[in-house]
Image (spheres, rainbow, N blue to C red):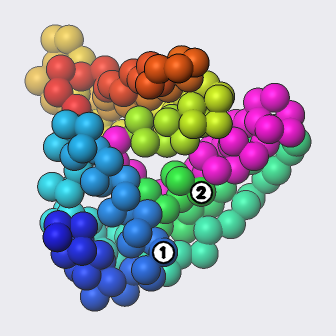
């Protein structure tokens, strides 16, 4: 019911069904993993950013540069889940051909818990590494003002007959 509600909210704001499905999948995945800070609780913030024009509901995601194993994508201020999922799909495709896939995304938005994208690679028997930058949200030691980001990182490693080993963290005390 919560997933359906989230779809309805995003669709009413003009997000196409495929894109809202991606966002709901990523957000629900975080909740199901117990990472509620990056789950459906983020919806009000996304609604606010969409209504303020900070997130485009119908972006034109495009490839800016491409090599055999690399790619740079302009997300055109899309929902971060949409551009990040696309980027990891491209990285996996490149890794299948070249042994490694490295994709950078520019002009995106918050994309939720990084484990989701790292696990996309692990499901293909690959090691997935995902990182991002953040705005200044931590004060360096001795400072009173936030000057550095907590720059999250996720790594997922396939483990034969077991669930993948997953690290999903930020460099701050709290995400």
Helix, strand or loop status at disc 1: helix
Q: Which quadrant of the figure has residue 6?
A: bottom left
The residue shown at (24%, 67%) is 3
Q: Residue furthest top?
A: 142
Q: Residue furthest left?
A: 144
According to the picture, the residue beneath numbered tag 2 turns out to be 86
Query: Any magenta on residue 149?
Result: no
User: What percent of the width, then of the height, locates residue 117?
Assistant: 49, 42
Q: Judge left or right: residue 13 versus residue 2.
A: right
Magenta part of the protein: which range?
87-113
Q: Which quadrant of the figure has residue 81?
A: bottom left
The residue shown at (53%, 75%) is 59
Please tell me whether residue 169 is drawn above or below residue 119 in the rendered image: above
According to the picture, the residue beneath numbered tag 1 turns out to be 18
Please tell me whether residue 90 is drawn above or below residue 156 in the rendered image: below
Q: Label 2: how many residues lie within 10 Å, few (<14), some (14-19) or many (20+)?
A: some
Whether residue 80 appears in this view of the structure is no
- Count of picture labels: 2
Helix, strand or loop status at disc 2: helix
- Quadrant into which the N terminus falls: bottom left
**Residue 61 - label:** none
- Disc 2 and disc 1: Cα gap in Å? 12 Å
Circles 2 and 1, Cβ within 8 Å, touching? The answer is no
User: What percent of the width, then of the height, locates residue 172?
Assistant: 24, 22
User: What percent of the width, then of the height, locates residue 54?
Assistant: 35, 70
Whether residue 118 appears in this view of the structure is yes
């Amino acid at each position: 019911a919560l997933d359906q509600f989230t779809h309805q909210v995003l669709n009413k704001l003009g997000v196409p069904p495929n894109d809202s499905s991606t966002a709901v999948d990523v957000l629900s995945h975080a909740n199901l993993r117990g990472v509620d800070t990056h789950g459906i609780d983020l919806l009000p913030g996304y609604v606010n950013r969409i209504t303020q024009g900070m997130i485009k509901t119908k972006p034109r995601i495009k490839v800016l540069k491409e090599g055999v194993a690399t790619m740079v994508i302009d997300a055109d201020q899309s929902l971060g889940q949409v551009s990040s999922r696309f980027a990891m799909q491209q990285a996996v495709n490149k890794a299948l051909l070249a042994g490694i896939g490295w994709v950078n995304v520019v002009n995106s938005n918050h994309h939720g818990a990084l484990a989701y994208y790292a696990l996309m690679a692990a499901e293909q028997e690959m090691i997935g590494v995902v990182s991002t930058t953040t705005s200044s949200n931590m004060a360096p030691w001795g400072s009173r003002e936030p000057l550095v980001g907590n720059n999250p990182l996720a790594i997922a490693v396939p483990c034969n007959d077991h669930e993948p080993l997953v690290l999903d963290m930020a460099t701050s005390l709290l995400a």
